[in-house]
Amino acid sequence: MRTCLRFVRTHLTTVWTMLLCLSAAALWAADTNVTAQTSPSTVYSMYDIIFNKGGIFMWPITAIGFVSVYLLVDGFLVTRKIKASPPDLVAKLKAALQAQNSDEVEKLCRDYRCMLTRVFGAGYSVRHRGHAAMEETIAEHGAREGMSVRARISYLNTISVVEPMLGLLGTVSGMIKAFANVATMGMGKTSELSNNISEALITTYGGLVVAIPVFAVYMHLRNKVNDLVVHVQDDVGDLVDIMRVQGK
């Protein structure tokens, strides 16, 4: 029980984000069911609502939504501390440094490619130039690694901005069609008018359903990246301290 509570506290934002995504999906399903129940003579499938009633702009909105799922999974994988700085690798590097086995240290940095080895390995390769040069190289590569991870999750922020704009574009398109039909056929043909208005609303709804949870996850991942960089810096600092004690 204590382990479960600790997990929930650690991943509270992740749990909240998942609940938000599930709530959005549930609201979409509930709205669809209500529409079907209130109009028993006309039953629309999810495919009809998205691709037929939603108009052409629902195609890129849906496609980007599927891309965002991949980016979300990739973001959670790339920000794992155990992937960036494996504890067993840190232990091996500490043991090799304490044994003053430089060949083993270099071999570990070559064989295990992760954020820790890329940052520490770069500094270790210039150790002969002194601690100042080594620490400067470590700081430079650490900043570079942080920028690389932030760049990978920044696509989620782009999606959270583009999706509502695509929905707004679909809204404008639907309203243009609606007023064009009113101008040519008058207010008598309400079916055409309602179809155009529904297209406008569906695209807005679709864009927001994708953008809101994606933006929430992006903010969570951005905080995880900051925490990840600090964690790796702490591990690299421990390794550098061992070298400093040994006078290397």
Image (tube, rainbow, N blue to C red):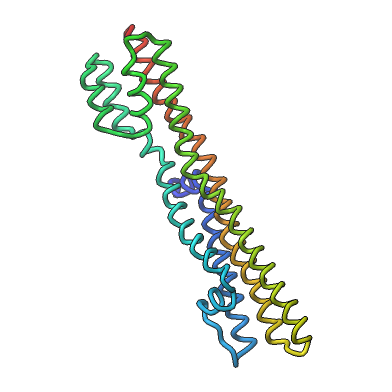
The residue at 62%/82% (across/down) is 35
Residue 164 % position (x, y) = 63, 59
Give residue 203's quadrant in the image: bottom right
Q: From what the image shows, is residue 248 above or below residue 103? A: above
Residue 82 % position (x, y) = 37, 38
Residue 46 % position (x, y) = 52, 77
Q: From what the image shows, is residue 197 above or below residue 171? A: below
The residue at 66%/81% (across/down) is 195
Residue 117 % position (x, y) = 33, 28
- In the current view of this chain or complex, which residue is farthest to the top? 247
Q: Is residue 2 left or right of residue 211?
A: left
Q: Is residue 66 left or right of residue 187?
A: left
The residue at 63%/64% (across/down) is 167
Give residue 116's quadrant in the image: top left
Report the label total: 0
Quarter of the rendering occupied by the C terminus: top left
Q: From what the image shows, is residue 104 above or below residue 225? A: above
The residue at 26%/26% (across/down) is 92
Q: From what the image shows, is residue 243 above or below residue 174? A: above
Q: Is residue 106 left or right of residue 153?
A: left
- In the current view of this chain or complex, which residue is farthest to the bottom? 41
